[in-house]
Image (spheres, helix red, strand yellow):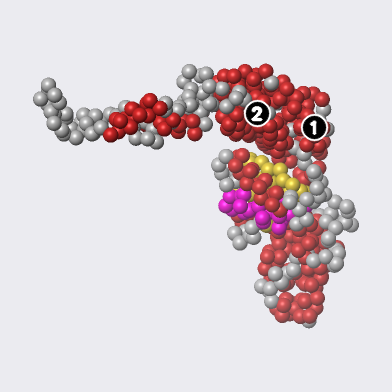
Amino acid sequence: MPRARPVQPADRRPAGDGRKHHEDARQPDSRQAGPAQPGTGRHPGPGAGLARSPARLMPGDRPPRVDAQVRACQAGAVSEPGGTELSATLRRIERAAGALATASAARMDETLPWFRALPADQRSWVMLVAQAGARSLVQWLRSGGGTAVSTQEVSDEVFATAPQALARSISLQQTVALIKVTIDVVEEQVPHLAAPGEEQQLREAVLRFSREIAFAAARVYARAAESRGAWDARLQALLVDALLRGDSPDVLASRAAALGWADAPPVAVAVGRSPGGEVSAVLHTVYRQARRIGAEVIGGVHGDRLVVVLGGAADPVAATGKLLTAFGDGPVVVGPAVPSLDQATESARAALAGFRAAPAWPAAPRPVPAADLLPERALAGDAEARRRLRHDVYATLARAGGELLETLDAFFAAGGTLESAARALFVHPNTVRYRLRRVSEVTGFSPLDPRDAFALQVALTVGRLDPVVPVAPTQTMTPAVGKTSQTGDDRRRSL
């Protein structure tokens, strides 16, 4: 807004004008009807004399035009329409731009320890930015402290002098500290930079321009963050796609390293339905929730599925339960935990197979481990689930002794009644109880639990349909099989 020149108040006029002012004030108001003027024979109209000149004001009054000028001055305008206000100050600032940048760099070196550790080229970039800030201040003042597009263009030019690599080397918090130091140095030099009588105007202009510089810095880092976010999103999508395809561990390791993945064990993959909408918004919700629980995550949206890789969570199922707000409706399946990302392909395959088979178990918990869906996965055609049921359940029962398979058949045929099964086997009911407890110990599935009984029935069916040669357990088999020191839940999750 243009700033008016200083105006003399009404009560500080010369003595002659003051006497004239008082004499006019004592004259009768010409707006009132009075005797006809000599020689005219007419009375003044009711609207005559409404527009009073400044000389007709009472002492202490200011014309409306003066009030508008005062309000413009109070609003902080820096130049009048002619553009002559602060001209001497602007010339001084132009001449002192280099000295201001040098003084700012010296102050940064004294007060900011991390600034001293910067390489020489980055320190020189900071000085260039400071000099550009002084030149932009002059341009901004000459444009009258413009608004909208002109102000944004002027403030953005400050950071255009530095390469984009500087935004990656210096954080936003550090940039704010640099701006604060520079503004402090300029404010200290205001008495020397401003022409006589213009100190307050320059100080106010510097404060308003510093706000524009802060917004410009925020825009620079926002654009950099958006660029990095888009690149990271592409890398994460490629990494998740490589996991689902089963690419080599070297490919997984290289892409994970580009994302800064810490590979904190254990690692597990969770699959659920995507809530829909923008992919960036979906993944942002995942990352926000993961930061709250202190877990490493890599996410990707594949079609209508949301795939999340979790690392560093001691209990991946419980950790996934805290991320449920990021998933859409429907089941959420968690694959088995593996030691590192190199082996996460196995967890991803199990989670995907469980997600496809989960509708067969409407009452499944949310989230549900993929191991708890072994019977549904086997019925849906998952070869890995059939192999595990055949080798780790049916073959284990066959190696433990034929009476266990015979007892299970009799128990299921009797509808889960111990006494009926004992009569069919010609044994005591306690013998049936002992054998059923033995089945639970060697397989991890209890025949007395309806859900486990269903899994055992499917395992018996798959084992008899697919020929199997009983062999000793190898390193590829589940360590929990045959160990009585673990609980049934632990064995099922390891399958």
Left or right of 360? Residue 119 is right
Residue at screen point 57% across, 39% down: 278
Given residues 194 and 430, the one toward you in this image is: 194
Left or right of 305? Residue 65 is left
Residue at screen point 60% across, 33% down: 207
Residue bearing the label numbered 2: 191
Q: Is residue 212 visible?
A: no
Q: Is residue 52 magenta?
A: no
- Crowd tier of the residue under label 2, counting other residues whose Cα lies within 10 Å: few below 14, some 14–19, many 20 or above: some
Left or right of 41? Residue 252 is right
| Closer to viewer: mark 1 or mark 2 | 2
Residue bearing the label numbered 1: 109
Mark 2 or mark 1, which is nearer the start of the sequence? 1
Amino acid on which the number 2 mark rests in the picture? Pro
Residue 172's x, y, as percent?
69, 36
Q: Give the SS element for disc 1.
A: helix
